[in-house]
Image (tube, rainbow, N blue to C red):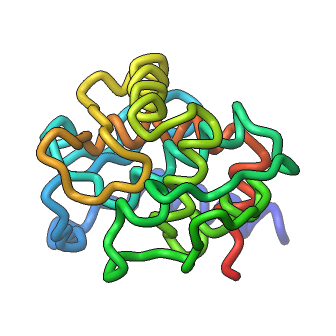
Amino acid sequence: KLLFILYIVMMSIFINPISIQAEESYSYPNLVSESAVLLDGNTGQVLYEKDMHKRQYPASITKIMTGMIAVEEGIMSETLTMSSEAVFSIGRNTSHIALNVGENISLEQALYGLAIESGNDAANGIAEHISGDIESFAQAMNAKADKVGALDTNFVNPHGLPDSNHHTTAYDMAKIMEEAIKKPKFLEVFNERR
């Protein structure tokens, strides 16, 4: 009996094949970003792009590069001491974690302040701790960007506050993020909420 039903179903498929068509009226979500890219994490293949090579001001996503370098080059238990430059070169009306001149915190604490609160003062402290000064850290950021294939990027600071020479592209940020997420400590810190 079961074989007979199976036979009838198979015959009806061959006699009256079902035609399946994609719904032509499907509309994609409206993307309001000026530029974007979606990469396959395993192959690097571009799955979607919208002006992915257009130069943009990266703002606080700059901190992805700062965090990646901190994880790669620093020791989390090391103590960094906040300088006057690290504290006062950013406006108090910007994102910060209220660090003071002479304050000592671990590199790990600074990294959490960078990732969770988008602390510009923490970014400066990290930069000075890793490279000695903000300008040298920016050079290290640009060298790292070149190394990961982010060739249309130029960083001038570790936090992303406005500067006409501070720019990247959606594609370059995807390449930077692709490298950053390979580091377990980066993922641990940047996935925390508080």
Question: Foreground residue, 75 or 115?
Answer: 75
Q: Residue at x 40, y 65 (%)?
A: 88
Quarter that holds the C terminus: bottom right
Residue at image x 30%, y 22%?
151
Judge left or right: residue 66 versus residue 70. Answer: left
Residue 153 against residue 108 in the figure, above or below: above
Asked whether, in this view, residue 187 is left or right of residue 26, the answer is right
Counting from the top left corner in percent of width and height, residue 177 is at 51, 43
Q: Residue at x 56, y 42 (%)?
A: 128
Coordinates of residue 146 in the picture (x, y in percent): 40, 19
Image location (x, y in percent) of residue 43: 53, 28
In the figure, is residue 157 to the left or right of 31? right
- Left or right of 153: which side holds 62? right
Report the front residue among 60 and 77: 77
Q: Classify 128 as above or below 112.
A: above
Residue 160: quadrant of the picture: bottom left
- Foreground pick, 182 / 113: 113
